[in-house]
Amino acid sequence: MPRLLEMSPVQLQSWCQDQGLARYRAGQVRRWVFGRRAAGFAEMTDLPRALRNRLEQTLVLFTTEVLAHRRADDGTEKLLLELADGARTECVLLRDERHHRTACVSTQVGCGMGCAFCASGLDGLVRNLSAGEIVEQLLRIARLLDRSERLSHVVVMGMGEPLANLENLFSALKTATAPDGLGIGARRVTISTVGLPKGIRRLAEQHAPYHLAVSLHAPDDRLRGELVPAGRGVPIASILAAADSYFAKTGRRVTYEYVLLGGLNDAPTQARALQHLLRGRPAMVNVIPFNPVPGLPFRTPASDDTARFVELLRQGGLNAQVRSRKGEGIDAACGQLRRRHLRAPAGLDG
Ligand code: SF4
């Protein structure tokens, strides 16, 4: 059966026409799905009952099943979803004191980038998620909110490398930002990449002011090659050049992510080298103390070392901040919940 979330508004209209339905039904259905967060055609009570029944028999709305739902004390919630083919993916709802309600979504099942400190990369890439599967994560997260709350931001920072699944990402973001979709402003969408220069340039060609976050994690090519194996042969200089051109085209300041690993990339000399690399760029540096992942040999840096690292960046004139970890205790770091459930049978958590 055709899947509604894979269809553009025009495709849904033509599908309605092919079914002998009025074209305006497409808009009605989309308003229910994106505006009123309906999870099924049965909820669309202003459609005639016969039409609701018919839609249920001819069109698929949600294709995933929630295998696990976890909540942390800080309001973070995480879903483990099973896709139609049995593959599993994750998405997270982040709440903050500014009333931002952010969905963090995945773009792939697993990941082929193999970052040494990441749970998602441990089992390699299984497959790309379709545009509809990405949109469905947003809808599943939106349905966790109270009626009075709205999804305000999207971060594409879950499992997978978004720029390795560009077409599906673009299509999903069109739905996320469309006024008759989820209506989230493009400036409130952050795309986090390991740093694929070609992908960054293609993203810039979209002429949408998405916020770009580039994962550096090391101030030199040798260490970066160890931490981000997919980045071997891609010099940091070429990533920075692509990011500079992204800023030139979109006017959006680029954020650089740096996972701080105790005793590995947190030395003062490394802070100075990073500061030297980024000096003069309109950049923000997010320093993220490593979140322990079972089975990985890295450690969380001492809080003094983290503070000193950030201070050295600031002394060099960079905007730098420690990014707080959310969702402690619910495997909120990308890929952790899925991995746990690859090893243990799935079940619903409190
Ligand atoms: S950090 Fe991101 S790019 Fe690296 S392996 Fe994990 S999901 Fe993939």
Image (cartoon, helix red, strand yellow):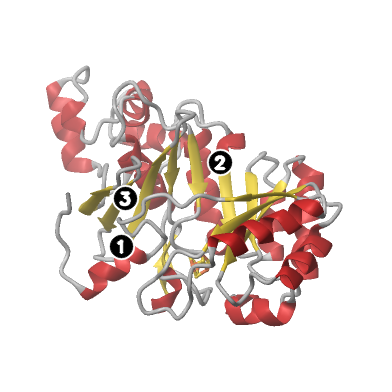
Q: Quadrant of residue 97?
A: top left
On the image, the x and y values in percent for residue 101 come to: 43, 34
Earlier-in-chain disc, 3 versus 2: 3
Q: Residue at x 70, y 41 (%)?
A: 207
Q: Quadrant of residue 340?
A: bottom left
Earlier-in-chain disc, 3 versus 1: 3
On the image, the x and y values in percent for residue 152 come to: 47, 31
Report the disc number at residue 78. Answer: 3
Q: Residue furthest front?
A: 304
Q: Is mark 3 within 8 Å of ligand 1?
A: no
Q: Which residue is mark 1?
A: 337
Identify whether 208 is placed above or below 302: above
Secondary structure type for disc 2: strand
Q: Residue at x 49, y 29 (%)?
A: 98
Q: Are marks 3 and 1 in contact (CB under 8 Å)?
A: yes
Q: Quadrant of residue 181?
A: top left
Amino acid on which the number 1 mark rests in the picture: Leu
